[in-house]
Amino acid sequence: MARRTSSTPSATHPVLRFILLLALLCSLRQVTAAAGHNYFDALHKSILFFEGQRSGKLPPDQRLRWRRDSALHDGSAAGVDLTGGYYDAGDNVKFGFPMAFTTTMLAWSVLDFGRTMGPELRNAVKAIKWATDYLLKATEVNGVVYVQVGDPHSDHSCWERPEDMDTLRTVYRIDRSHPGSDVAGETAAALAAASIVFRSRDPPYSRLLLQRAISVFEFADKHRGAYSSSLSGAVCPFYCDVNGFQDELLWGAAWLHKASRRREYREYIMRNEIVLHAGDTINEFGWDNKHAGINVLISKEVLMGRADYFSSFKNNADDFICSVLPGIPNTQVQYSPGGLIFKAGGSNMQHVTSLSFLLLAYSNYLSHSNKAVPCGGVSATPALLRHLAKRQVDYILGDNPLGMSYMVGYGTRYPRRIHHRASSLPSVQAHPARIGCKAGSRYYISPDPNPNLLVGAVVGGPNVTDAFPDSRPYFQESEPTTYINAPLLGLLGYFSAHS
C-alpha cells in the first residue's frame, strides 16, 4: 500500500508535481490522441443506454424505439408484481444486487454532478426512477426483499429477445430465514441515495424511499448473512458475493446518515468501523465491494469540517488515492500500455468508471477544503486527480491505441458486435415473428454487425494489452452493463461543463 507521509496534506510542490506528471505521461505511451471530445453528446448517449435495458411496459416517451414491452408477468409466480427495472447486461435476467448498485451510482452521479448535466439531468432522474419504482416493489413486504427474477441457467442457454423470452422467470427472495445483508444493504443504500435526489423534486416520493430504506437496512442488519449462501445456485457464479456482506452494511448506513442526518447512523458507522472492516481492500469499488466508495463518501463531511470523528475514513480515502496513482512506487492498480486502469476478471470497464468517479468526486471534496493528498514524495492535488479521471474517460471515448470508442454510437469507430441479445437479434418491428430459444444462435455466431444500435452502451473493454475483439462470444470484453454506465454519468456531466 502506498502510504502517506502525514495525515495533513502539504502544499503542492511544483517540482514534485512535474515528476508525477512526467511519470504519468510515460505510463500513457502509445496513445492515439483525439482532437477533443463532445462530453455532452456522450452524456446524452450514456443515459439513453438505460432505456435499452428497460424491462416491463415501456412508457410513451421511450426513445430507443426498437425495444418493445417485455417480461410483463414478472413476479406472478410468487403472487407479486415485479415488472419493470433493468436487465443488468446482455441477458434477460433482473439481478437485484447489480441493479441496486447501479441505482446508487446513478443517484450519486446526480447528487454530485447533476448541476453540470444541463437538459440531460431530467433524463438522468428518469433513469433513477425507473429503478427505484422497481426496488419499491421488490421491498414492499416487510422482512422480504425480492432479489432476482429469471433463472440464469435457463436464460443463458438461450439467445432470444426479451420480447420473446420463454425461459423460466423464477422469483428469488431473501427473508429472515434466508438472509442477504449484502443485497439488502445495497438496496437500502440505493433507496436512501435516491431519496435525496427526489427530496425537492417529489417530496412524498422521497419520504417513501427513505422510509423504505430505513426498514430494509434494519432487516439487513438484524438478519445478517450473504445472499450467495442463501441462494448460491441462482446467483453464483453470476453475481456471487465474494467480498462479504459487511461493506454493504457500512455503505447502507453511510447513505442513510447522509439522507436522514439521524444520529443513530453516525453512531452505527463509528461503532462498526473496525468490526465491518472499513479499511480493507481500499482500492476496490463495484457492485461487490464498496470499501473505497464508503471512505470517499464519508470523507466529504470530514473535508467540509463537519465530522472530525470520521477522520479515519479520510485516512483510508487518502490511502485509496495513493494506491491508484500511476508512475509512483507501490502503485497497487495496474495500467495498460495505453493508460487504462486494469483489474483482473471480466468487464474491466466497471473498474475504470467506478474508480474514476471516486477520483473525480474526491478531487471536488479536496478543492472545497483547499487540500491535497500527500503520497510519499508526491502531492496528489485536486487538479491531478481530475486529470487522471479525465484520462480514463478520454480512453473510453477513443483516445487509445486502437483509436476506438468503447461507447456504442459515439464517434466513427465503436464496437458493432456487442454481446447483447436484444441488440444482436432483429427487432420486433423488423421481424414480427417469434425467434425461439435456439433459433437465435445463428445471430449469436454471425460475424455481421448487430442490427439494433444500443446507443450509449459501454462494453467490458480491451484486455491488459489494449487489444479488443469485437465479437459477441468474447463476452468479458464485448458485453455492456448498467453498472459500467452509471458512474460514467457523473464523469461526463462534469467534463461536459469543465473541458
Image (cartoon, rainbow, N blue to C red):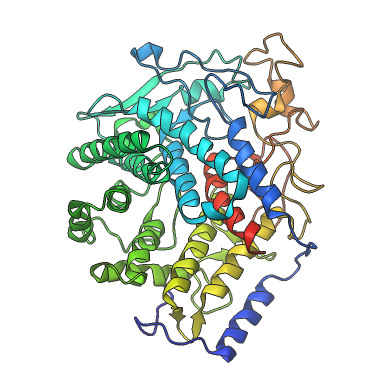
Q: Is residue 237 above or below residue 340?
A: above
Residue at 37%, 64% (x, y): give it: 300
Q: Nearer the viewer, residue 154 or 360?
A: 360
The image shows residue 158 at horizontal and vertical percentages of: 59, 20
**Residue 11 in view:** yes
Q: Quarter of the image containing the N terminus?
A: bottom left
Residue at 27%, 59% (x, y): give it: 277
Which corner quadrant of the image does residue 312 belong to? bottom left
The image shows residue 196 at horizontal and vertical percentages of: 38, 46
Which corner quadrant of the image does residue 7 belong to? bottom left
Q: Quarter of the image containing the C terminus?
A: bottom right
Residue at 49%, 67% (x, y): give it: 364
Q: Is residue 139 above or below residue 379?
A: above
The image shows residue 464 at horizontal and vertical percentages of: 64, 58
**Residue 458 in view:** no
As drawn, is 136 to the left or to the right of 424? left
As drawn, is 168 to the left or to the right of 26? left
Residue at 20%, 30% (x, y): give it: 176
Q: Nearer the viewer, residue 169 or 440?
A: 169
The image shows residue 315 at horizontal and vertical percentages of: 34, 72
Q: Is residue 217 above or below residue 247?
A: above
Give the residue at the far top of this rendering. Answer: 433
